[in-house]
Amino acid sequence: MEREIEVKLLDIDILDFEKNIQALGANFVKEEDQINITINSTAHKIYKKQGYLRIRIAKSGDEEKKYFTFKENISDIKVRDNIEHTTEINSVDDLINILKCLGYDKFHKGYKNRKKYNYKNLVIDIDTWDENTYPKPYVEIEAPSINEIYALIDELKIDREHVSTMSIDELRKSLKK
């Protein structure tokens, strides 16, 4: 179980952002390709205010890891504040079959490339999804506190209109409007 305090930065110049954090001294950690499957049910829906279920397959170099996570939503005021309940799994197919037996019938598979940086106490992810999931790259900033997140945003002179607390499912739905 891990607490996660984060925001997304939408509609910014990603190349400029990456150059700027490198100039500040951010350390490149790794690049990985992910398959993310969000899960829900028509019979016993998990509402946004509760959180969401996800299966993630992350590949970096020769390493592949699979995780099952419930992201419990604590708040989405100024930041997304979640408790991540995560376990590593062996078989995605077996887990999906178990979830189907329990009545989960909504599965959305998305493909994402993630570049990860560390800067001070922050984790900075540059995420690029497949066109069908979300067509615009964005940045995710995670830190131990809201103050550290907004200090970096201010240091980089990023307008607060670019800050979002939406989940990927909410971003996807916002494009359909």
Image: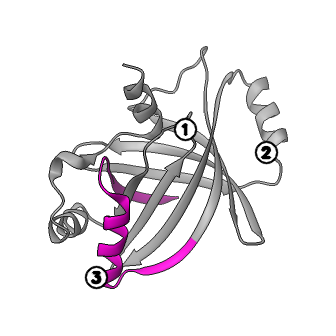
Please indicate whether residue 15 sits to the left or right of residue 30 in the image: left
Pointer 1 residue? 131
Mark 3, mark 1: which one is toward the viewer?
Answer: 1
Upstream in sequence: badge 3 or badge 2 = 3
- Which residue is located at x 66 percent, y 55 percent? 87
2 magenta-colored: yes
* Mark number displayed over residue 24: 3
Residue range in magenta is 1-30
Q: Position of residue 79 (x, y in %)?
A: 27, 50
Q: N-terminal of the two: label 3 or label 1? A: 3
Q: Quadrant of the C terminus?
A: top left
Q: CA distance from mark 3 to mark 2?
A: 39 Å
Q: What distance separates the C-alpha of mark 3 from that of mark 1? A: 31 Å
Q: Which residue is mark 2?
A: 92
Q: SS for tag 3?
A: helix
Name which residue type carries label 2.
Answer: Val
Question: Secondary structure under badge 2?
Answer: helix
